[in-house]
Amino acid sequence: MSGQQPGRDKVFKPLEGDDPRTVAGYQLAAKLGAGGMGKVYLSYTPGGRPIAIKVIRPDFSQDAEFRRRFAQEVKSAQRVQGLYTAPVIDADTEGSEPWLATAYVPGPSLADAVAEHGALPVEAVALLIAGMAEALHVIHGAGIVHRDLKPSNVLLAADGPRVIDFGIAYAADATSLTGSGVTIGTPSFMAPEQAAGRKVTAATDIFALGQVAVYAATGTPAFGEGTSHGVLYRIVHEEPDISGVPERLRELVTRCLAKDPAARPTVPEVIALCQSANAETVLRRPEDWLPGAVAADITGRNAAPAPPAYVPTQPVQPATPPPGYGPAPTHQPPTHQPPAYQPGPQTPAPLHHTPTQLGAPPTYPGQPQPSYPQQYQHPQEQAQHQYPTQLPQPTPPVPAKGKRKGKGVAIALAAALIFGIAGGGTAYVLLKDNNKGNQAQEDPAPKAKPTPKGGGGGEADPAKSPDAGASSGSEEKPTPTPVPDPEPADFKDIDLTAGYHLTFSDDVVRPQPGEDGAYELAYDTGGYLDSESEGGTLALLDPGQPGSLEACRAETRFTESIYTTKLSKGRQVCVTTGTGHIGLVTVQGFSPEDSPSDYMSLDLTVWRNAAAAAAASN
């Protein structure tokens, strides 16, 4: 078997002493690799589909800012569903060791393929870059800049490439570890603006795409190798070495590697350049689009090892695992028979059984509790998956009249005694409090109207009638008085610098330093507007949609961040703060390329406490 699958042991490494055996219920079958962010393991879904689980390094998981951005990027990545991306199917960003699971791609990385078998032919490079460009199209469409597009983050499958790890480098940039000798990303594949610490945009990924094309076609990086400082200097100040790039790919890599981000091609232009470099009239991806040696590596990776069977070492309580992701136990719980009912004065059964909500799913020795993907709800969140902690007892026959015993009789006698002393109203309250969940009982107050003075048959005084109290209790609550909308406060020509924020409650709203700290509106240096206040939301209005307080109140397309790549002059953003203010941002423009400061110009209209006023009116 090993002879038919060369290198299998090199691909699927056995678990070592410091490797976990399970991750949130997923049983690990092998280790796929390790990098600057953590380790990657092979596992399976309950249906037998192989997946790759990346467990983040402990030192990263201890950084609060990394966790916040990691959670944000995972949430965005789960929206990416492209033919040339490996979808994120499960994740835990809150646990002691954050992790995420993606579909397993049975193929080598571009870095491994080139290192072992050499450069790819022109046709394969054209198909590779075209597929990667399609992946960037859906990644950028989700508001994500990859930031770390390199050969090791491109997997070669039989039906095309797969781009992985999009957005995770952004979370790593936020951690304090990046300033203490920890390098995230490969310097050889950075863009000039990224190396210089300037604004990162979708064009940054296009530059990296050109570098990947040079590497795939020649086997060496476009700006050479060596120390990171030397490589970064050449990226910023020198031209790439493309002397070994085939002529048909020269225009593609030259345009992608332009120093000026504005001069780089768009994704559709990249695909058109790949088309012109291809020998065929159209881009068609045959089954044998890769060289035979690389295709053989794919065959070997298809035979992934199965996870070891889990056998509990101790008896466990019978339980039916809830549906969802994470392996189920292999043992079969015995059939549980409800105990026979034995009537007795000390075992009264309730007339109405209310199931008690099930606690956390059972865990097994050495196996953490399973995690569930977003499309599945945890059973605790679904009423139909609630189970009683004890099976309901059969309802006993009702004893003959006059012979009932137990707690209910004592309550009824006490209530009757109180009724004779304190009046029917008090007894009614006590009976109601002791019979929650039953139907409303009749008012025990006497219904006969008092006879008017003089013995006549006239009407009784309504104010003294027992019915007056009953009717007053059923009166409808008064309709709340509408709260008028607050007056708008306008602030024009605000230059919001990256790394600064706005606070809507200030008398004069002006930028203040700080981008992370539960701010109501911040311009993050990552290139996006951010609402970090608890309960705060953003909503991007459509072009031509008039901005107003009513429009912002009616808008429900909420998000917590909006990348500036989606903004242009005239676009408007509704901001609802966690403190109850509503703001309307109107984009007026951005700083020029030669500006030493990165800022966006905007007008702001604030309706203070408008969210609270709307709630009070309802």
Image (tube, helix red, strand yellow):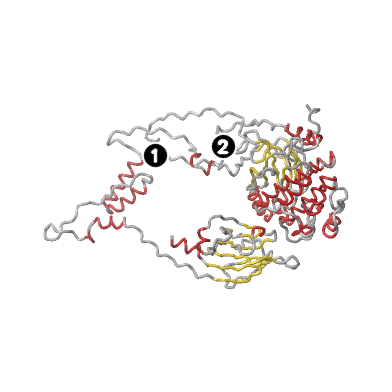
Above or below 415: residue 388: above
Q: Where residue 363 sits in the image (x, y, percent)?
A: 60, 38
- Which is more N-terminal, label 2 or label 1? 2
- Residue 182 visible from this viewpoint: no
| 489 versus 139 height, above or below | below
Observer-nearest of 36 and 610: 610
Choose mark 1 or mark 2, whichever is in front: 2
* CA neighbours of label 2 inside 10 A, class few (<14), some (14 to 19), many (20+): some
| Callout 1: SS | loop
Which amino acid type is marked by label 2? Answer: Pro
Tell me the crowding category of disc 1: few under 14, some 14 to 19, or many 20 or more residues within 10 angstroms, Cα based: few
Query: In the image, residue 354 lies at what x, y percent?
Result: 43, 40
Question: Label 1: which residue?
Answer: 352
Q: Are marks 1 and 2 in contact (CB under 8 Å)?
A: no
- Whether residue 261 appears in this view of the structure is yes
- Residue 289 sits in which quadrant? top right
* Residue type of the residue flagged with mark 1: His
Location of the C terminus by quadrant is: bottom left
The quadrant the N terminus occupies is top right
Q: Secondary structure at mark 2?
A: loop
Where residue 449 sits, quadrant-wise, is bottom left
365 vs 591, nearest the viewer? 591
User: Residue visible at 75% across and 53% down?
Assistant: 206
Location of mark 2 (residue): 323
